Image: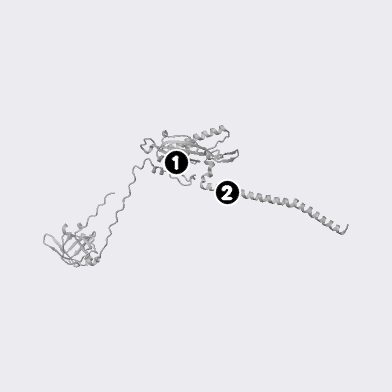
Amino acid sequence: MTPREKTLALILGCLMVFGVGGGGFYYGFYSPISSLHTQVESLETEVGRLESDLEKESNKVASILKLHPRLQGWRKLSLPVAEKPGADAQNAHLASVRMDYSTLLRDLLTNSGFKPNNTVVSVGRSFTTQSIPKLDFKEGKKDAYKPISFEISTQGRLEDLGVFLEMLHRVPLLHHVPSMKIENAKKAQTKSDLKILLTVEGLMVPGALKNNPLVPDKLAKEAKSSLSDQMVLASNPRDYSVLASANPFFPPDDPPPAPPSPPPPPPSVVRGPEEDREEVLSGVKLTTISGDGRRWEAYVYDQNRGGRETKLRTSAAWADFTIKDKYDNSMLKAKLLHIDPAYIVFQADGELYLMRCGETFFPVVNTPMEKEELKQLGLEKLVPPKPKVAPK
């Protein structure tokens, strides 16, 4: 074999070794590893999707329970479910629950003020049959709940209807009022003649506690008692008493009287110039006290205004007098009560004052007479009587 042939044979052998080895590496190691990586990535993607769905579902459940916390106790709040399987047992249990629930409704209506002889409670058609979702149970797919519907026909007042709805609201059961109709009964003369049609629907949920009895008497008494702090399905408080105040058939007999209108504001007074009161009264003097044996007189002179003196007597026509400034503003309104040869006694602003000849009204008006002084002068009778207070 020539050297050239040996070189070609060596190259061919190397190519065969690398070709067989590379194929074995690809098919025996690289291809399975690559396929495994692809499967792992696919599974991780699926796990991520499932975790995202689970998180969304958990958030949805949490939001529902946040809005309606009472749903957390649905196993206790459901109408009682049958303990025994089988169609006969189920039908017998359903008939028993219907009887107990109708008894509960009649008790609530009676406790609310409706008369039994005007009330009819009968089995009605369900409002939610078409929209009941299916859930997976151990026995297979079942309705999430079974509604039990009742029709109520009664006659009474809106006040009684408000009480009934409030009491039904308090009963710890899963139920609601899907429809309500109020009509004015024929020849209605009073508020008690309104015709009321109601549909009440209770729910029986599979998986509820077996020992969840429906005791009408107990539930009716609990509903009649004061409202406790129990959580209710309604997210906002309900005030059913407003029904009575919104009666469209019988408006209130005696509407509340309109509040009295406020008194008109006093007319605005534009005051003119005014002198100082003390200065004006300092210029008015008691000048003379005289008597003719039959009656006494006193004379007052206003030095500010000049003119003639003012004559005063204790008689009604001469007793009242007013001192004014030069702008005709009243500075003092007084009444003469007593004249003595040495002094006079006058009344102003509810007080009594003693004034002697030669004195001016200021500063006399700064010193009202005391009871002791009146007593010493024998003038107690001048004290005005206290006004009588009317008995309450």
Q: Is residue 246 left or right of residue 38?
A: left
Q: Residue at x 67, y 50 (%)?
A: 40
- Quadrant containing the N terminus is bottom right
Disc 2 residue type? Lys
User: Which of disc 1 and disc 2 is earlier in sequence?
Assistant: 2
Indicate the position of residue 346 as horizontal and vertical percent values.
Answer: 20, 61
| Residue in front for this viewpoint, 305 or 322 | 305
Secondary structure state at the residue bearing disc 1:
helix
Indicate the position of residue 376 as horizontal and vertical percent values.
Answer: 20, 61
Disc 1 residue type? Leu
Disc 1 marks which residue? 165
Q: Residue at x 78, y 54 (%)?
A: 19
| Residue in front for this viewpoint, 358 or 240 | 240
Q: Is residue 125 left or right of residue 386?
A: right
Gap in Å between the C-alphas at discs 2 and 1?
37 Å
Indicate the position of residue 249 as horizontal and vertical percent values.
Answer: 38, 40
* Residue 205 picture quarter: top right
Disc 2 marks which residue? 56
Residue 161 vertical placement versus 380 (above, below): above
Indicate the position of residue 178 as horizontal and vertical percent values.
Answer: 47, 40
Q: Is residue 142 left or right of residue 334?
A: right
Residue 214 is at least partly visible in this image: no
